Image (cartoon, rainbow, N blue to C red):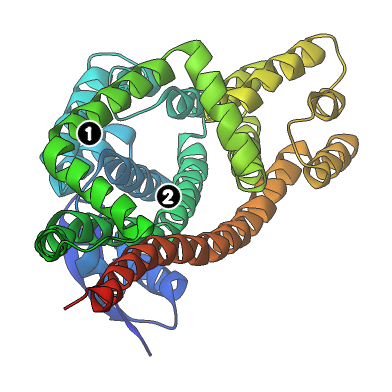
Amino acid sequence: MPVFSYRGTTREGAIVEGSIEAADERAAIERLKNTGVIPLRVATPTVASQWRLRFKSTRADLVAFTTELSALLGASLPLDRSLNILADVAESDELRKITVSVLRSIREGSSFADALQRHPAMFPRLYVNVVRAGESAGAVDAVLGELSEFLESTQELRDHVVSAMIYPSILVVTGGLSIILLLTFVLPRFASIFKEMGTSIPLPTQVVLVVSGFLQGWWWVLLLAALAAAVAFQRFRRTAQGQVKWDTLKLRLMEDVIRKLETARFCRTLGILLRSGVPLLQALNNARDVIGNRVIARSVDGIMAGVKEGKGIAAPLSSSGAFPPLALSMITVGEETGHLEEMLLKVASTYEKSLKQSVKRFVGILEPAMILFMGLVIGFIVVSMLMAIFSITDIPF
């Protein structure tokens, strides 16, 4: 039976750590609850150690805060006592300071949502609105559980995309460095040899040597031009027109991946908000904010106008043309049967799985294309040098 390490708290607030044998993580959690321990984190020892050693980002702190607070409130502990425990067990100084600040605000009379709203860098507007809806319904522990699942699903999807792009990124870096090494260090040695020999150099070799000489003499110009272009591009991207044009280009290049990604984001966010009791128009407004592509986000404005006119959500979504047909069909069924929230979450799960396959397929095409391109460039350089070497045999003695 596998062994799980855990970190938890007793109802008196004492922090306990240890290990426990169980069939799976859920069984381990149940065994801990039966012993009077409120589990805050349960994992295999290897995963737990990696979690402690890896760089702690704000997003990771938010996931930890939400998961642990949901567990404490689910065990019927008061909010202020739960926050006090979280301040003691926080693994980063920043999270500890924010938790103490939130606790102080609540004790001064602020609502939980208002206390969170004072820290926008940690708690986004979507998070605060869901908590506010949970407070109104008296179900903060339930909405925190929903938020925990949402954040973990989002993080898993992001990690999958990032990990899929690691190998192509390594290919670009190593291939680029190889080409620069050939052009700036290897070729100049051959150039001096050819110059001393006084032989005619084949045209491909001349082209490569000209490029090599330019890089040697004017590399600083290229570097400055690249930096200036990068700064200009970033400034243009920050403008409204630049964002739309850049997102339009990305949509043309990777339409299948981007549409599935944005569909999963939009549907999961909207489903979580509606299930937490947030009104439809406010939920749509918040769900629009999580859409990264401005072209797709603009279409949500038309959806909101249709909802205000009493057309429901399925018809305006179909008219927008921003979402795939399968998603539209599932949402229509959910609206007709009165289970819109559940269907939106099913759509999100469906497209998250499909997105992983699309990313895998995209990377599967990208990797050989990059290898082929790098091979052609390096091959052209090597063949050019060989042609010049073979031409030496034509020198009359």
73 above or below 35? above
Instruction: State which tag comes first along the sequence, 2 or 1.
Output: 2
Front residue (pair 324, 122): 324
Amino acid carrying label 2: it is Gln
Q: Is residue 322 above or below residue 111?
A: below
Q: Which mark is residue 222?
A: 1
Q: Is residue 232 above or below residue 16?
A: above
Point out the image quarter for the C terminus.
bottom left
Residue denoted by label 2: 155
| Towards the viewer: 334 or 252 | 252
* Mark nearer the viewer, 2 or 1: 1
Q: Quadrant of residue 108?
A: top left
Question: Residue 335, position in %: x, y?
Answer: 84, 35
Position of residue 150 measured from the top left corner of the image (x, y, whole percent): 51, 45
Judge from the rendering whether residue 79 lies leftward or rightward of residue 368; answer left or right: left
Residue at point 40%, 54% (across, down): 162
Picture residue at 18% right of the left edge, 67% below the top: 17
Pinpoint residue 323: horizontal percent, then vertical percent.
74, 36
Does any portion of residue 393 appear in the rendered image?
A: yes
Q: Is residue 330 above or below residue 360?
A: above
Q: Is residue 311 left or right of residue 55?
A: right
Residue positioned most to the front: 397
Question: Judging from the image, what secondary structure is the residue with disc 2 in?
Answer: helix
Helix, strand, or loop for circle 1?
helix
* Residue 137 appears anywhere in the view: no
Query: Decide: marks 2, 1 in contact (CB < 8 A)?
Result: no
Q: Which quadrant holds residue 40?
A: bottom left
Asked which quadrant contains residue 62, the reply is top left
Q: Separation of disc 2 and disc 1 at Cα?
A: 38 Å
